[in-house]
Amino acid sequence: MDPLLIGLPGMALILIAFVLDDFHKLSVDSKSSMMMNIAGAGLLTVYAYIIMSIPFIILNLVWFFFAAYKLYDSVKDGKSK
């Protein structure tokens, strides 16, 4: 399997969430945005592992866990949109 089949969708999810926030179509605090970041970072972590890029693995694991914590925190507090 070509690793790009994992990396490109991950990249697309993160970029789409970023662009939608930048154009005020989706809030960075929305559940949808957080889920797109979690999925995107998860896919990019797998991609980085396949290509053995340690800096990219660390970056995307941090991104994944921060987005997951932010989603958990917003759901716990009843702030999710």
Image (spheres, rainbow, N blue to C red):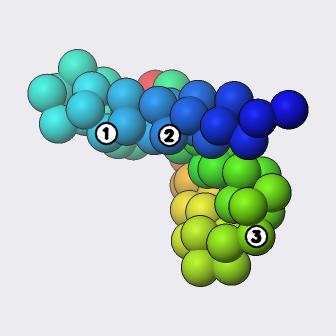
> Which residue sits at x=16%, y=27%?
24
Alpha-carbon span between mark 1 and mark 3: 26 Å
Could you say whether the residue bearing mark 1 is in a helix, strand or loop? helix
Alpha-carbon span between mark 3 and mark 2: 17 Å
Q: Which badge, 1 or 2, is on the more N-terminal residue?
A: 2
Residue highlighted by disc 2? 11
Dot in front, 1 or 2:
2
- Indicate the position of residue 9 as horizontal and vertical percent values: 58, 29
Q: Nearer the viewer, residue 30 or 23?
A: 23
Q: Nearer the viewer, residue 40 or 27?
A: 40
Q: Tell me the tag on residue 52.
A: 3
- Residue 23 in the figure: left or right of residue 43: left
- Residue 75 in the figure: left or right of residue 50: left
Amino acid type indicated by mark 3: Met
Residue with the most extreme top position: 25
Amino acid type indicated by mark 2: Met
The count of marks equals 3
Q: Mark yes or no: residue 50 visible.
A: yes
Residue highlighted by disc 1? 18
> Which residue sits at x=50%, y=31%?
13
Could you say whether the residue bearing mark 3 is in a helix, strand or loop? loop
Alpha-carbon span between mark 1 and mark 2: 11 Å
